[in-house]
Amino acid sequence: MARKQGSYADTTGPRVRDAALRLIARHGFAAVSMRQIAAEVGVQAGALYSYTPDKQSLLFALLDNHMADLAVAVAQAGIVGTPRQRLDGFTRFHIRFHLPRRDAVFVSYMELRNLDGDNFARIAARRRAYEDVLEDILRDGVADGSFRVDDTRVTTLALIAQLTGITNWYDPAGRLTRDEIEAIYCALVRRTVQA
């Protein structure tokens, strides 16, 4: 069947990705069908294949876009200074980047296991590059005596998991502002590395 009137690649493609992200975050990758995504967008199921070859490719695109955006943002964040200053800068950056992207964060962490071998390896490499930003800060802090850390890799993974977990519970309408949450988490992170 032909595309519905008003359905254009430059608008429908992003709508397909947005709908897939919402549905996968809500129901899980395995439970979401291409037919459901098409219904959400308002196109015939067969029309989706104009935008993605298959569901696996769509999942990869969602994770890859998220990690690409994260890589650009952290490179532009201006996280500089002493290891302590950089640790605070990374903590604040991570919270600010991830809070408005709850669905993307959930899908990136929970659905990585559903990628096939090559796609998994590509996303894992992007994730590792991001983790290396924090691990470099920790190594520099250990080297200059600012931090006491038993294992920089384990601490990196633990801190990122702790920071990312905010997306599961933080409510912008709650009693604490984002700035207050950032200050609390900076203190938590500093205590973790005994800064």
Image: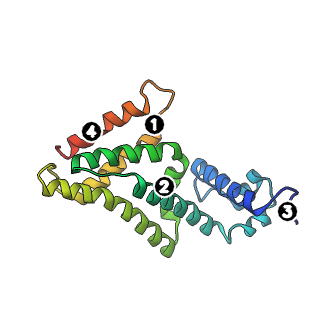
Quarter occupied by residue 43: bottom right
- The residues tagged by marks 1 and 3 sit, at their Cα atoms, a distance apart of 40 Å
Q: Nearer the viewer, mark 2 or mark 4?
A: 4
Please name the amino acid that badge 2 sits on. Met
Residue where numbered disc 4 is placed:
188
Residue where numbered disc 3 is placed:
3
Give SS at disc 3. Answer: loop
Q: Earlier in the sequence, mark 1 or mark 3?
A: 3
Q: Nearer the viewer, mark 1 or mark 3?
A: 3
CB contact under 8 Å: marks 4 and 1: no
The one of 69 and 116 positioned closer to us in this rendering = 69
Residue where numbered disc 1 is placed:
169
CB contact under 8 Å: marks 2 and 4: no
65 shown above or below 27: below
Which residue is located at x 75 percent, y 53 percent? 41
- The x and y percentages for residue 194 are 16, 44
Give SS at disc 2. Answer: helix
Please give left or right for residue 53 compared with residue 125 in the image. right
Q: Earlier in the sequence, mark 3 or mark 4?
A: 3
Residue where numbered disc 2 is placed:
110
Q: Earlier in the sequence, mark 1 or mark 2?
A: 2
Which residue is located at x 48 percent, y 63 percent? 113
Crowdedness of circle 4 by 10 Å Cα count: few (<14), some, many (20+)?
some
Q: Which mark is residue 187?
A: none
State how the image is colored: rainbow
CB contact under 8 Å: marks 3 and 4: no
Give SS at disc 1. Answer: helix
Q: Nearer the viewer, mark 1 or mark 2?
A: 1
